[in-house]
């Protein structure tokens, strides 16, 4: 992931949550928004209102810092857009996410896992946050006990607005206790 090298020497052990997606330029009450399949994410950058007004429906690739609600749906009010790149044609790729954090909870009955993302050394995150993801029962039952670090990969599903985990593995984190 871009930017991880700026956190060396702990770069391979950083907390992070990134959603790589694509969407269309849209105006929400006159303000720039990125439409990811019916969910509108505000673009709070100076000058973007004019860009989106001049290019309605244009495609953009976006890197987002996702935040979820307790049911695993993406929260557009708390999710922040990290970067936008205009695209000439509609992309064929799906929306992918990657996260690394401390496993807080596993709920097989609801099909959910929750991990905590904390501030990294020299990081900009002000407060830790919980990221709740939907996962298959098989994946949930394969997870380690809560408390350890995990790395999760998956996809964003626009129809449901959820982040769905496809793979999860134990992962060391920079603040793990030393033996």
Image (spheres, rainbow, N blue to C red):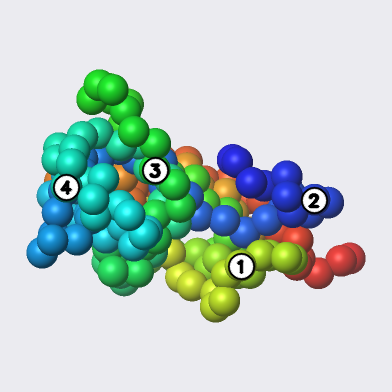
* Inter-mark Cα distance, 2 to 1: 15 Å
* Inter-mark Cα distance, 3 to 1: 19 Å
Name the residue: 73% across, 65% down. 122
Q: Earlier in the sequence, mark 2 or mark 1?
A: 2
The percent position of residue 83, horizontal first and vertical second, equals: 44, 47
Along the line of sight, which residue is nearer the eye, 119 or 54?
54
* Inter-mark Cα distance, 3 to 2: 25 Å
Label 1 crowd bin: few (<14), some (14–19), many (20+), radius 10 Å: few
Left or right position of 146 against 138? right
Left or right position of 90 against 63? left
- Does the CB distance between marks 2 and 4 fall below 8 Å? no
- Does the CB distance between marks 1 and 4 fall below 8 Å? no
The percent position of residue 108, horizontal first and vertical second, equals: 35, 61
At numbered mark 1, what does the secondary structure look like: helix, strand or loop?
A: loop
Residue 53 tag number: 4
Which residue position is annotated with label 2? 8
Which residue position is annotated with label 1? 124
Q: How many marks?
A: 4
Q: Earlier in the sequence, mark 3 or mark 2?
A: 2
Image quarter hosting the C terminus: bottom right
Along the line of sight, which residue is nearer the eye, 167 or 60?
60
Which residue position is annotated with label 3? 84
Q: Earlier in the sequence, mark 3 or mark 4?
A: 4
Label 4 crowd bin: few (<14), some (14–19), many (20+), radius 10 Å: some
Let me know if residue 66 appears in the view.
Answer: no
The residue mark sitting in front, 3 or 4, is: 4
The residue mark sitting in front, 2 or 4, is: 4
């Amino acid at each position: 992931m871009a930017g991880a090298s700026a956190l060396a020497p702990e770069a391979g052990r950083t907390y992070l949550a990134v959603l790589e997606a694509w969407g269309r330029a849209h105006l929400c009450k006159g303000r720039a928004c990125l439409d990811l399949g019916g969910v509108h994410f505000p673009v709070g950058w100076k000058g973007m209102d004019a860009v989106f007004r001049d290019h309605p429906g244009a495609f953009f690739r976006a890197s987002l810092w996702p935040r979820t609600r307790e049911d695993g749906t993406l929260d557009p009010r708390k999710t922040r857009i990290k970067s936008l790149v205009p695209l000439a044609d509609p992309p064929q790729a799906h929306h992918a996410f990657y996260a690394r954090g401390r496993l807080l909870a596993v709920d097989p009955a609801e099909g959910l896992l929750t991990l905590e993302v904390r501030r990294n050394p020299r990081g900009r995150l002000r407060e830790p946050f919980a990221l709740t993801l939907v996962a298959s029962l098989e994946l949930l039952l394969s997870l380690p006990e809560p408390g350890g670090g995990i790395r999760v990969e998956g996809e964003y599903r626009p129809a449901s607005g959820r982040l769905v985990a496809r793979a999860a593995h134990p992962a060391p984190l920079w603040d793990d206790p030393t033996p």
